[in-house]
Image (tube, helix red, strand yellow):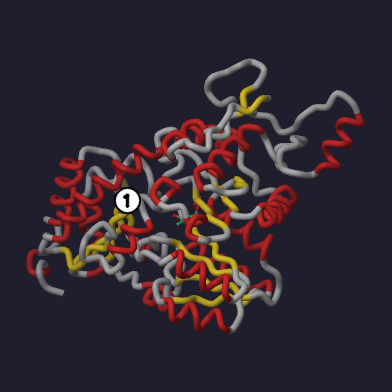
């Protein structure tokens, strides 16, 4: 295997297509898929030294590492400006591995209210069983973070923008605050991808992705990636993953590498379509409120402009008439697929209160601001006029006496 030369002057779109490419003796052009569970050695002594090394990069067994998976890790590390990256079987496997590798009984974990539902469930229902003290903090309230950090914490965990309400968190300010109190900042950057936001450059210690979403971009495989500002943290997580086993399949890594080649183009197109639909929805009488950081009226619109290279493809909005109206609208859509996934070329629609956030208690949902009339769109790559027509048809299903009232 030989590494093709990466140039530090490359722009992000080039890095996403070219970085981290290992070429085998067959001189293939496309990244090779090494669908093998283990690797062979010329001698017992060579096997012994490879197993003794126990570092990422020396292949013995695919649970520990694999050349196709490594290409994905190296490319994401280059895109994020990271010292190291580690791939996992899913986004949740990334979050679980990071927490189990870096936290211990008695540690405090501060997390932003309104995180992805399974992440909140992992923290509140599972990590708490191991004596990890988990505390929810309002994501954009820096004074509340400061107050919570004063009582001590090992790790702060945030998403930006949050899902499904799209609050943008001031990552540079939060990183400085966390570090002043000796805590690490971990950012779930799934919605932005490295194309729109690079939290390590803003001071975050670890960044993680559900690669299932935009990195694949075509709704095919599960995957997760964690990037690290410092190698020492990455190696702690590597040692956990290679022992516990939430490793990424080389097949999925290969699909994800192909997804990365079009990521920059896709993120620009998702953002453009989403902005157009968010503007249009804002003028509709059946719609009470639109949440989208690309709109000038969004509370963190200016911060989004500083911190991100585009608004992203997720739009959520509240219809008048609660769950009944939301369900009627969703059921009338023909183009938007009813599914929990996001970040797909195909546009999708979700009712967060009964699906992605359905396992939260009513109080947790209320704290997170996820009401019964809330609808989340992941705006895909179809023609935006066709998408608008579909939404128009959906809004026509709302009872006329509900339109314009709350
Ligand atoms: C989907 C998602 C996850 C979980 O990822 P999986 O790949 O489904 O395990 C975590 N965080 C965010 C923001 C997500 O959208």
Query: Whole-percent x and y of residue 247?
Result: 65, 45
* Most foreground residue, 9 or 190: 9
Residue behind mark 1: 310
User: Going 33% across and 60% down the picture, which residue do you hit?
Assistant: 304
Query: Whole-percent x and y of residue 336?
Result: 27, 46
Q: Is residue 82 left or right of residue 269?
A: right
Figure quadrant of residue 267: top left
Q: Is residue 54 left or right of residue 323?
A: right
User: Going 37% across and 76% down the picture, which residue do you hit?
Assistant: 366
Q: Is residue 103 above or below residue 311?
A: below
Q: Is residue 380 left or right of residue 214?
A: left
Q: Would residue 225 be visible to someone looking at this image?
A: yes
Q: Is residue 25 above or below residue 21?
A: above
For the image shown, how many numbered marks are present on the structure? 1
* Quarter of the rendering occupied by the C terminus: bottom left
Near mark 1 (Cα within 10 A), the count class, few <14, some 14-19 or many ≥20, is: many
């Amino acid at each position: 295997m030989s590494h093709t030369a990466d140039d530090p002057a490359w722009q992000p779109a080039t890095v996403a297509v070219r970085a981290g490419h290992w070429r085998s003796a067959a001189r293939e052009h496309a990244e090779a898929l090494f669908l093998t569970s283990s690797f062979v050695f010329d001698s017992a002594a060579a096997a012994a030294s490879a197993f003794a090394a126990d570092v990422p990069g020396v292949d013995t067994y695919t649970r520990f590492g694999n050349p196709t998976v490594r290409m994905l890790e190296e490319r994401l590390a280059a895109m994020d400006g990271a010292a190291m990256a580690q791939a996992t079987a899913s986004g949740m496997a990334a979050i679980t591995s990071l927490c189990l590798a870096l936290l211990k009984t008695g540690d405090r974990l501060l997390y932003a209210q309104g995180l992805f539902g399974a992440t909140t469930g992992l923290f509140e229902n599972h990590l708490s069983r191991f004596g990890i003290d988990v505390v929810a903090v309002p994501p954009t309230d820096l004074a509340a973070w400061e107050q919570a950090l004063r009582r001590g914490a090992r790790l702060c965990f945030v998403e930006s923008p949050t899902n499904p309400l799209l609050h943008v968190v001031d990552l540079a300010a939060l990183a400085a605050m966390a570090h002043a109190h000796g805590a690490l900042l971990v950012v779930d950057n799934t919605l932005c991808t490295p194309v729109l936001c690079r939290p390590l450059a803003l001071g975050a210690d670890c960044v993680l992705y559900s690669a299932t979403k935009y990195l694949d971009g075509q709704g095919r495989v599960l995957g997760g990636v964690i990037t690290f500002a410092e190698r020492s943290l990455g190696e702690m997580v590597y040692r956990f993953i290679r022992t516990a086993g939430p490793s990424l399949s080389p097949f999925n890594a290969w699909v994800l590498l192909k997804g990365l080649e079009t990521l920059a183009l896709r993120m620009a197109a998702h953002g453009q379509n989403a902005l157009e639909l968010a503007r249009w929805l804002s003028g509709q009488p059946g719609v009470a409120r639109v949440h989208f950081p690309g709109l000038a009226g969004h509370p963190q619109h200016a911060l989004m402009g500083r911190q991100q290279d585009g608004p992203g493809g997720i739009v959520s909005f509240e219809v008048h008439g609660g769950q009944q109206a939301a369900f009627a609208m969703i059921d009338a859509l023909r183009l938007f697929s009813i599914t929990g996934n996001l970040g797909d070329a195909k546009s999708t629609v979700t009712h967060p209160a009964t699906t992605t956030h359905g396992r939260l208690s009513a109080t947790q949902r209320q704290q997170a601001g996820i009401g019964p009339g809330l609808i989340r769109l992941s705006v895909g790559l179809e023609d935006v006029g066709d998408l608008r027509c579909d939404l128009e048809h959906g809004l026509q299903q709302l009872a006329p006496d509900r339109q314009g009232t709350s």
